[in-house]
Amino acid sequence: MDILGVRAAVMRKFIFSILFAVGLWQFGAAMLIYAKAALAPTLIESAWSNTLSTGEPTKPWPWADTWPVARLQVPALAIDHFVLAGANGAALPFGPGMLNSGSNLHLDRSRIIAGHWDTHFGFLPRLGIGSSILLQSADGETRTYRVVSSRIADARDESLQIDPADPQLILVTCYPDGLLAYRGPLRLVVEARRDVLPASLEMSRAHSRTSLTSFRSHTGGT
């Protein structure tokens, strides 16, 4: 084999080694993403438990750019999500994100929480007027809210307005318009206001309704 042939063979082996190494690195990165996605709910729940115990924000993993700031529940729909700080790319893949999560999370004030339509906030269309929503804050207190409105808004024409004197909970998600799917300008906006019904009583009522539904399904009742 002449010198050119040897060089060509060496170059092919070098290129193959580089491609193999890149492929292995990409595979490892993909596996890390899947592993983190699988472990994220458990890590976030553990971080929230620590926050309730210490009163201090706790990251679910050391390099996380977000942390749990609240727990959102809809007992009637069996919905239970941990709300993360910030409605951005660091938070939304793992749960709903709170826009105004900077400070004083234990105080009564308006909250805006956003989530993806095709994951955590897919239940929003099922919330009707009067639906109950529970929100636990970092001080451990759970507040009850009642849905007062649900509407489609165009992000190009309006912005969310909140009244500091009237504590409310606003849930927002992208609304598919058929053409641009989830990346269009439409938003589903659900507004809820504080309710005087204790959260513990609301959970008890929801459990009773679930038990009655289960009983009817097994007995053929209506």
Image (spheres, rainbow, N blue to C red):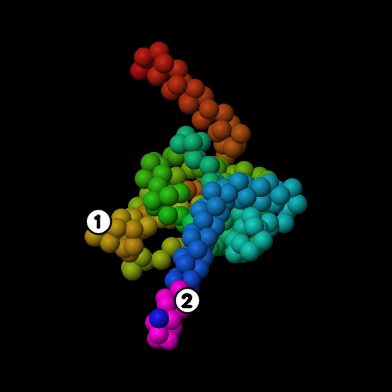
Of the pair 160 and 117, the residue shown nearer to us: 117
* Residue at screen point 45% across, 39% down: 131
User: Taking 63 as reference, is 158 left or right?
Assistant: left
Q: Quadrant of residue 12?
A: bottom left
- Across and down, in percent, residue 127 comes to 40, 42
Three-letter amino acid code of the residue under disc 1: Gly
Q: Nearer the viewer, residue 222 or 23?
A: 23
N-terminal of the two: label 2 or label 1?
Answer: 2
Amino acid at pointer 2: Phe
State how far apart marks 2 and 1 are (Cα): 49 Å
Is 87 colored magenta in this rendering? no
Name the residue rendered at 39%, 52% in the picture.
117
Residue 35 on image: x %, y %: 55, 52
Tell me: residue 159, above or below residue 129: below
Q: Residues within 10 Å of mark 2 (few under 14, many from 20)?
A: few
Disc ID at residue 178: 1
Mark on residue 14? Answer: 2
